[in-house]
Image (cartoon, helix red, strand yellow):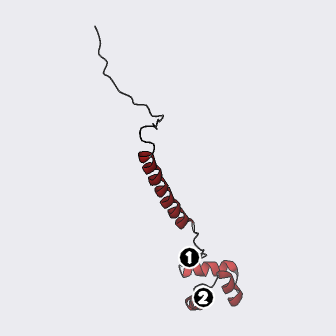
Amino acid sequence: MIQHAQAMICEDPRLSIRKMVSILEVSDHMMRNIVEEDLCYKSYTLKKKTDALRRHQRARVKRVERCKKLSSSLKQQAAGRIRFFSDEKMFTVGRCENQS
């Protein structure tokens, strides 16, 4: 049974365990044990990759372009008229000395 399952997998690696169960007419549990324990294979489903990575890269390029455009327009057109403020606070630590 193990050798027959091995031959089927070598012939068509995309063959599902359920198909093998119906072809060999054994239980699902037995076929999973053969594939996973005896043959040391792991079953998985191939999935298509999403387009998310490419979209993320395109969005990043657009953001960089827009930032450069905004920066250059601020330097040229609004020089001296616009001031940027942030909510950051500059802390200075002074050393305390005892006045005794």
Q: Nearer the viewer, residue 41 or 97?
A: 97
Q: Crowding near pointer 2: few (<14 within 10 Å), some, many (20+)?
A: some
The answer to whether 13 is drawn above or below residue 67 in the figure is: below
Residue at 43% in and 50% down: 72
* Secondary structure state at the residue bearing disc 2: helix
Residue marked by disc 2? 5
Crowding at label 1, few (<14), some or many (≥20) Cα neighbours within 10 Å? few
| Mark positioned earlier in the residue sequence (1 or 2) | 2
Q: In this rendering, is residue 61 above or below 25? A: above
Nearest the eye: 19 or 5: 19
Q: Is residue 53 above or below residue 74?
A: below
> Residue 42, labelled with which disc?
1
Residue 100, horizontal then vertical, whole percent: 28, 7
Residue type beneath disc 1: Lys
Q: CA distance from mark 1 to mark 2?
A: 14 Å
Using residue 90 as the reference point, say whether residue 100 is left or right of it. left
Q: Position of residue 20 (x, y in %)?
A: 66, 86
Q: Residue at x 35, y 27 (%)?
A: 92
What is the tally of numbered marks visible in this picture?
2
**Disc 2 marks which amino acid?**
Ala
Quadrant of the image occupied by residue 21: bottom right
Looking at the picture, tell me which residue is in the foreground, 49 or 66.
Answer: 66
**Residue at 60 percent of width and 84 percent of height:** 14
User: Which image quarter holds the N terminus?
Assistant: bottom right
Mark 1 and mark 2 in contact? Answer it, CB < 8 Å. no
Q: Which quadrant of the figure has residue 18?
A: bottom right
Residue at the outermost top position: 100
